Amino acid sequence: MKQYFGVVYLENGDACICSSCESEEEVRNAMKKAIAKNPTKIKATTFMVRESDKKLTLFDLFGHPKSRDLMQDKKFLSTL
């Protein structure tokens, strides 16, 4: 089954990603709702399509990072 993930890029460099939708029309409606919150701060929009038998999550799309937060690492902070 195809799954759609909408992405709205903001001018400040942030991005909003909607959860899995089942159709292109559904993802477009989800993006319209996200755009309506800050209509003047939108830089671009797009959507991703993935094929999978199970319902995908955002973790499935981008992986499960195992990195540490460097701003909480006292050794790293002392080097700044």
Image: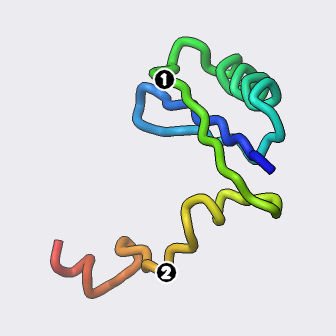
Quarter residue 72 falls in: bottom left
In-front residue for pair 47/52: 52
Give the color scheme: rainbow, by chain, secondary structure or one colour. rainbow
Quarter residue 38 falls in: top right
Residue at left 70%, top 17%?
A: 36
Locate residue 80 relative to residue 39 in the image: left or right: left
Residue at left 72%, top 20%?
A: 32
In-front residue for pair 12/56: 56
Q: Residues within 10 Å of mark 1 (few under 14, many from 20)?
A: few
Which of the labelled discs sits on residue 44, or is there none?
1
Which of the labelled discs sits on residue 62, or is there none?
none
Q: Quadrant of the C terminus?
A: bottom left
Residue on which the image places disc 2? 66
Q: Residues within 10 Å of mark 2 (few under 14, many from 20)?
A: few
Locate residue 73 relative to residue 40 in the image: left or right: left
Point out the residue furthest to the top here: 40
In-front residue for pair 54/76: 54
Residue at left 81%, top 50%?
A: 1
- The image shows residue 20 at horizontal and vertical percentages of 76, 47
Q: Secondary structure at mark 1?
A: strand
- The image shows residue 24 at horizontal and vertical percentages of 75, 29
Asked whether disc 1 touches disc 2, contact meaning CB atoms under 8 Å apart, the reply is: no
Amino acid at the residue labelled 2: Lys
Please, is residue 70 above or below residue 38 in the view? Answer: below
Q: Secondary structure at mark 2?
A: loop
Distance of label 1 from label 2 (alpha carbons):
29 Å
Amino acid at the residue labelled 1: Ala
Point out the residue furthest to the left here: 79
